[in-house]
Amino acid sequence: MLKSDLRLKYIELRDKLPKKELLDSSLTIANKLLELPIWGFDYYHLFLSISEKKEIDTSFVLSILQGRDKNVILPKIQNQRLDHYLLTDSTAIKKNKWNVPEPIDGIAVEPLKIDVVFVPLLAFDLHGNRVGYGKGYYDGFLKECRPDILKIGLSLFEAEDEITDTFANDIPLDYCVTPNTCYKFSSTT
């Protein structure tokens, strides 16, 4: 399917999700992350959920990261790109004009320092390609990261067979976790 069609399909599917199912699925996904071999690193990039868009609730993932004393990096949209800040006890969070919760300011972290990134998405396929909202923020960010960074999608739904309009410069996921499955893609060593 085309990215534009998948975007429409999965926005509609998410809109229909009951709140309890969204929370249960979010907790299940967070617990399934514990099955992945990703916990030996220091710097983890995590998006904060847009509750108005019924995104996966990443507060459960945040609790796991904090419980394991990991450095959590949060994105902030600035000048058509993402900047990245270390989450500390004094970090103030505010929703931007798109209802994205983000740090007001803080300690900046360069993308090359990040080891693992949890990637927001609407849909993904069996090859690790993903569909986001179409603004390209994560595509640009992932190009600034080390080639060995682990890219983990978090999805409320299972994989599509194929996204047909991918580009050569799209950066595929290494893993994607759903309530039922931990997908590992061939690019992962």
Image (cartoon, rainbow, N blue to C red):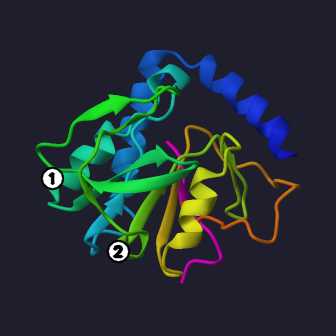
Q: Is residue 136 visible?
A: yes
> Residue visible at 70% across and 22% down?
12
Q: Specify the amino acid type for callout 1.
A: Gly
Instruction: Please identify the quadrant where the C terminus is shown.
Output: bottom right
Q: Nearer the observer, disc 1 or disc 2?
A: 2
In this rendering, position of residue 11 left or right of residue 149: right
Q: Specify the amino acid type for callout 2.
A: Lys
> Residue visible at 31% across and 55% down?
85
Q: Report the span colored magenta.
A: 176-189
Label 2 crowd (10 A; few <14 / some 14-19 / many >=20): few
Q: Secondary structure at mark 1?
A: helix
Nearer to us in this view, 136 or 130: 136
> Is 71 a magenta residue?
no
Q: Is residue 1 above or below residue 118?
A: above
Label 1 or label 2, whichever comes before in sequence order? 1
Q: Quadrant of residue 25?
A: top left
Label number found at residue 67:
1
Label 1 crowd (10 A; few <14 / some 14-19 / many >=20): few
Q: Which residue is mark 2?
A: 113
